[in-house]
Amino acid sequence: MVMILFIVGQAVINFNHGAVATPLYNYGMYSEVFKVKPVYAVIKVEVNGRNLRGEDFSIQQWDKIYLPIRYYLAADSNNNQMIDIRNRMFSKLGLHSLQSSNHHFTNTIISPKQFMDWYAKYLDEIVEAPVQSVLIKQQPFSSQKTILSPITDTDQLILPAWNSATGTVVK
C-alpha cells in the first residue's frame, strides 16, 4: 500500500512540476541548453608564489579553494537576491510587516582584509604547507566554440594581497 502511494505521489508531482521532484529521474536539471558566454573571468589563486591548479587537488579540495572566493565576491548580490526572494514570499503569504525587517536577515559582509586573513589560514590546511603569501587574481578569457583564449596577457588583483610576515593585507 505504501509503495502504491509513493508511486502515485511521484506521478502527481511529476505531472504538476515536470520530472524534477523524483529521486529516480531528474531530467529538469539538465533539460536546458548550455549557453556559451563570449567572455569568462578566470580566477587564479597564487600561494607562496605558485599558481594553484585544479588538477593538483581532489575535486573536494579544489572546491574548498575556489568556492570561498566566488561566494565572498558574490556576497552582496546574494544578499540582495535573498531579500528579494523573501519579500516575494512574504508578500504572497500576506506578511507585509516582515518585509520591512527583512534586511536584518542577511549575511554580514566582512572586509577584504578579514577575508584574506581567514582565507590564508584556511588554505594552510588544504595545501598542507605553511602559507606565506596569497594573491587572488582574475584574467578575462574569450571563448571561441570550445577554446578559451586569454584576452590580455596580464591578470588583475581582485582582492588585496596577503603576506604572513605582517599577518595583514599588503597594499
Image: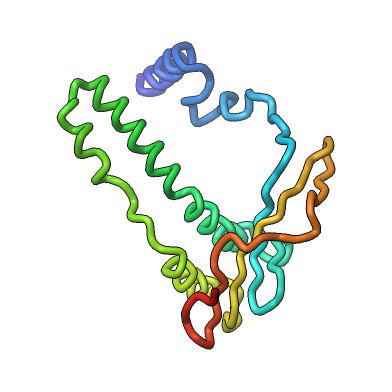
**x and y, in percent, of residue 144 in the image:** 83, 38
Q: Is residue 81 left or right of residue 61?
A: left
Assign the N terminus to one quadrant of the image: top left
Question: In the rendered image, which quarter is residue 85 located in?
Answer: top left
Color style of the picture? rainbow
- List the single residue furthest toward the left: 97
Figure disc tally:
0
| Residue 160 vertical position relative to residue 103 in the rendered view, above or below | below
| Residue 106 vertical position relative to residue 29 in the rendered view, above or below | below
**x and y, in percent, of residue 133 in the image:** 59, 78
- List the single residue furthest toward the front: 171
- List the single residue furthest toward the bottom: 165
Q: Foreground: 47 or 4?
A: 47
Q: Is residue 91 left or right of residue 71?
A: left
**x and y, in percent, of residue 65 in the image:** 58, 63
**x and y, in percent, of residue 114 in the image:** 42, 69
Q: Foreground: 53 or 69?
A: 69
Question: In the rendered image, which quarter is residue 59 located in?
Answer: bottom right
Q: Is residue 2 left or right of residue 39?
A: left
Who's the residue at 61% across and 74% down the image? 127
Who's the residue at 55% across and 61% down the image? 64
Who's the residue at 84% across and 43% down the image? 147
| Residue 90 vertical position relative to residue 59 in the rendered view, above or below | above
Assign the C terminus to one quadrant of the image: bottom right
